[in-house]
Image (cartoon, rainbow, N blue to C red):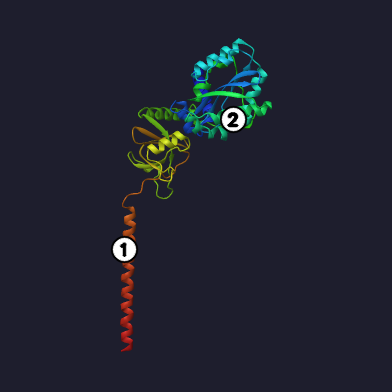
Amino acid sequence: MSENNNENSQHSQLMKYALESVKDNEQAFLLVEGKITDAILVKAQVHVENRSGILIFPFSVFKGDILTIYSVFGNSPLIIRMRTYEKYPQFLLDTMEIVKSGGIDKALSERIARSIYKNISASSLFKTVQKISKKNYEELVALIQNGINLELKINTTKANIDVEKISSLQFRIGNQLDAVLLPVQNPYNIQKEEETKKIVIPVFENSPEKIKAEKEITEIQKEFQKVIVCKTVVSPVAGLEFDALKENTKLLFLLPFQTEEEIEFAKQMGAVNKEGVNKPILGTFYRIITSGKNEFHIFAKGPNGILFRAFEERPVRLATPKKAGSNLKKVESKSDISMTLSIIVGVLVTLVAILLFLYIS
């Protein structure tokens, strides 16, 4: 019993962290399963007047939110020896050595972390994602330097940074740095944290139906090389109801289209029109799994071993591609009506002419 409680508690913690970074439960499930990466990890070596320090923080590529911050500032000589290009596990170990060596100004460290939360908005970070992917860090460096300068009322802050794309869950859960240094939480985000606590995560509730659904979803996804979380295209009038879906039925989906990687992937899949706008892509219906009263997981086969996955909170009618002959049938139908009307008008004109002839005679 205690093992089940521990597993449920771990799932809840994972989902709580995941939902801080991604936009919905679907993406959260994929993040927990290790199917996607969701964050950019910033490793910064910072010089502030006569002090130096290290900032380590991941931010969401989906929202731009800073998820947590580790901040170490002081006069330890080890700080200036840090190399931001190191992979983050080694960077964390080196930061642990700095903390253990002493000479850390805790008040300054926390103040600088708070200045990052306060002065760097999610929208400004989100705008840097495309530039970061091209190894252009100038805008991000400027954000960090200006944020600290505003807080300390100086203009001499210098930052040297490097970044890695990571899973925020792998970074945050069991982070070895926690043994010697606790992260600085966002003091300006109390309301958001309260809202996060209220989020209900039904998929991991300890009920036979949901556990069964979770296992089925995992088994389905194992069969495919890649899983893409999509949106369904709904057609309230002409679409197919869930009960009418059969294997190999063609359905329409919209691929994710926000980050630079998503846009590039959509282009490769032919899901972008000439104007650069995402357009529906064809998928072949595979399975639909119900994990609760209002939880419908829709799976369809895409090209090249890709699995499309979508989620609906209620039964809807799913759009299907228009048949090639549908427009022709409409044209033919209109032609038939026009021909019938022409015959009727011709008969009426003839009758009127005959009546006039008889009347004159």
Gap between marks 1 and 2, in whole Å?
Answer: 68 Å
Q: Nearer the viewer, residue 245 or 109?
A: 109
Asked whether the beta carbons under mark 1 and mark 2 sit within 8 Å of each other, the answer is no
Q: Secondary structure at mark 1?
A: helix
Q: Name the residue carrying label 2.
A: 143
Give percent across and percent down for residue 202: 50, 31
Q: Residue furthest bottom?
A: 361
Q: What kind of residue is marked 2? A: Leu
Q: Name the residue: 34% across, 61% down.
A: 334
Residue 284 x, y percent position in the rendering: 34, 39
> Would you say 315 lies left or right of 76 here?
left
Pick whichever, 336 or 254, lies toward us: 254
Q: Which mark is residue 152?
A: none
The answer to whether 331 is drawn above or below residue 180 in the figure is: below
Disc 1 marks which amino acid?
Asp
Q: Residues within 10 Å of mark 1 (few under 14, many from 20)?
A: few
Left or right of 258 on screen, residue 142: right
Which residue lies at the image location 32% right of the left edge and 50% below the top edge? 324
In the rendered image of this protein, does residue 142 appear above or below residue 76? below
Query: Within 10 Å of the Cα at label 2, are there few (<14), some (14-19), or many (20+) other Cα atoms?
Result: some
x, y percent for residue 16: 54, 27
**Residue at the disc numbered 1:** 336
User: In the drawing, does residue 154 fall left or right of residue 122?
Assistant: right
Residue 47, position in %: x, y?
61, 21
Q: Which residue is rendered at x = 33% and y = 87% of the image?
A: 359
Q: Is 115 on the left-hand or right-hand side of 86?
A: right
> For the C terminus, which image quadrant?
bottom left
Asked if residue 82 is positioned above or below residue 192 in the image, the reply reads above
Residue 127 visible in rendering:
yes
Q: Outermost residue, right direction?
A: 153
